[in-house]
Image (cartoon, rainbow, N blue to C red):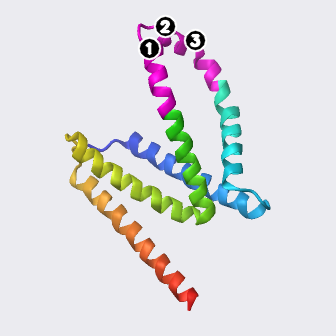
């Protein structure tokens, strides 16, 4: 089933992630001695500035929800793993971007998407990908593989 809004949001998310990676790499290229850890800190700082007003607006609804039976325990149970995994994801993303290029990081992200889709389909069953979905998954895999082969060939030529 085609969902236009879903695809539009996915395109906006992909564009924002691409811009995010390119700007991170550009900052590292232009600012001497800026490390991926520094980028992680600045990103966290700027995200706090962006999301703090949103937190204030949604605060009353969150507190009402948290007042439900067992919600505080569930919140504590899920908060730590989500924060740790989010921090590790951002750290790995900036590390990959600083060591390679934004494009290589995007290809790695595509490979992650392919693997997580495959794992989800097998582990949780009931994944109903259409022929178009499987074709998209195949296209992502082939594109990532072709990029990796082209990069390896380019490095081999430069080494000679």
Q: Indicate which label's residue lies in the foreground, 3 or 2.
A: 2
Q: Using a 10 Å C-alpha cutoff, classify the residue at mark 1 as few (fewer than 14 neighbours), some (14 to 19) or many (20 or more).
A: few
Q: Indicate which label's residue lies in the foreground, 3 or 1.
A: 1
User: How many circles with numbers are drawn on the protein?
Assistant: 3
Part of the protein shown in magenta: 54-81
The residue to which callout 2 is attached is: 67
Q: Is residue 154 above or below residue 101?
A: below
The residue to which callout 3 is attached is: 60
Instruction: State how far apart marks 2 and 1 are (Cα).
Output: 7 Å
Q: Using a 10 Å C-alpha cutoff, classify the residue at mark 2 as few (fewer than 14 neighbours), some (14 to 19) or many (20 or more).
A: few
32 left or right of 155 in image: right
Residue 131 drawn at (x, y percent): 21, 55
Residue depicted at 40% across the width and 54% down the height: 112
Prevailing secondary structure of the magenta residues: helix
Q: Of helix, strand and loop, which one carries label 3?
A: helix
Residue 79 drawn at (x, y percent): 50, 27
22 left or right of 140 in image: right
Residue 107 drawn at (x, y percent): 46, 62
The residue to which callout 1 is attached is: 71
Residue depicted at 49% across the width and 7% down the height: 67
Instruction: State how far apart marks 3 and 1 are (Cα).
Output: 15 Å
Instruction: State how far apart marks 3 and 2 are (Cα).
Output: 11 Å
Residue 69 drawn at (x, y percent): 41, 7
Q: Of helix, strand and loop, which one carries label 1?
A: helix
Residue depicted at 51% across the width and 30% down the height: 80
Q: Are marks 2 and 1 in contact (CB under 8 Å)?
A: yes
Q: Is residue 53 above or below residue 60?
A: below
């Amino acid at each position: 089933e085609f969902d236009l809004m879903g695809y539009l949001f996915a395109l906006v998310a992909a564009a924002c992630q691409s811009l995010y990676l390119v700007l991170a790499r550009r900052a590292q290229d232009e600012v001497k001695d800026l490390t991926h850890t520094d980028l992680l800190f600045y990103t966290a700082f700027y995200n706090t500035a962006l999301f703090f007003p949103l937190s204030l607006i949604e605060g009353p609804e969150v507190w009402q929800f948290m007042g439900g039976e067992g919600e505080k325990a569930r919140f504590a149970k899920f908060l730590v793993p989500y924060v740790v995994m989010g921090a590790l994801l951002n750290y790995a993303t900036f590390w990959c971007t600083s060591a390679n290029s934004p494009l290589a990081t995007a290809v790695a992200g595509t490979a992650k998407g392919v693997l997580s889709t495959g794992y989800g389909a097998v582990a949780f069953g009931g994944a109903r990908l259409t022929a178009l979905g499987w074709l998209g998954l195949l296209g992502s895999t082939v594109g990532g593989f072709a990029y990796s082969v082209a990069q390896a060939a380019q490095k081999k030529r430069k080494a000679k």
